[in-house]
Amino acid sequence: MRDIPDFDTFVKVEPIHKGWSGDKKYYVETKDGEQLLLRVSDVSAYDEKQREFDIMKKMSAIGMKMSLPISFGICENGKSVYQLFSWCDGIEAKEALYNFSDDEQYEFGQKEAGILKQMETIDFKPASLEWSKSYGERVERYIELYRNCGYTFEGDEVIVSYLQTHQHCIGERPTALMHMDFQTDNMIISPDGELYTIDFQMCGVADPYLVMTGAGVSAMYSVPFAMGQIDGYFGKTVPEDFWKKYNYYMVAEMLYAFTVGVNMEEERAETLHMFDDEVERIKHNGSLIPTWYKKSF
């Protein structure tokens, strides 16, 4: 790492062991007291990391509160690629929200919805994208991955059948450049009460409704926050069409999460609990509106 520009100004470089990413991550302090985040990856990931860094520059250019991209390049004698970002001081939102009242948690959720709307304004159009076809192909890959993962769960064929017979729910949707894991795990609440977005490894062009499935994950930690996410995006009247798409996206992404998390007991247990509810809803044609979404709290 010593060949990273300005490495000689680093007075503290501490490894960070939290998170799923295979990147090596470090908390850095400089001689001037600046706090930074350093990510180091194998050089084989150069193109992927360059794209990720460029996307973050586009997102920071619209004023998003986030870990800001500073520099990018090759290090360790050509063996690695590095990304240097500003450090977001604070506590992970899923932990910090417990320190706030329900009304304050709801307001944070509304702030998150505002960030999502900001992302929709980014000028980033793919050469061509038929969203319904693209996502349908993704769902088929999810199903194939599940069938080959070596684990099963009760009611899995109900889930698979639903995904295969309800692709029409998606239709053609507007797309935008999105943070694809947009929930409380990837947000920081700063000491002065600002909400920052972190961990941009999963970014791409998608239907914003897909990204809003993050509210279902957030609801496991804070129902008011999750409600604020939905209400902040739509106002007090949520279109019925949204819930149809939300449920389809949620079931598909849960199947994928189960597949990639099969070796992580806690993650697998959380997903299985959510599957129990979805299997019952599908079997009995239950309400599309999730039970956590209430009119009051």
Image (tube, grey):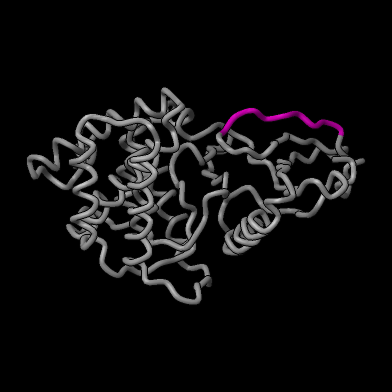
Q: Inspect this view and state whether residue 289 appears.
A: yes
Which corner quadrant of the image does residue 176 belong to? bottom left
* Observer-nearest of 26 and 169: 169
User: Would residue 108 be counted in the magenta stretch?
Assistant: no
- Residue at position x 30%, y 51% from top? 249
Query: How many numbered marks are there?
Result: 0
Span colored in magenta:
11-19
Which corner quadrant of the image does residue 169 belong to? bottom left
- Residue at position x 50%, y 72% from top? 126
Above or below residue 240? Residue 260 is: above
Q: Quadrant of the N terminus?
A: top right
- Residue at position x 39%, y 44% from top? 145
In the picture as drawn, the residue positioned furthest to the bottom comes out as 127
- Residue 282 in the image: x percent, y percent? 14, 43
Classify residue 102 as left or right of residue 159.
right
Q: Quadrant of the C terminus?
A: top left
- Residue 175 in the image: x percent, y percent? 40, 67
- Residue 52 in the image: x percent, y percent? 62, 56
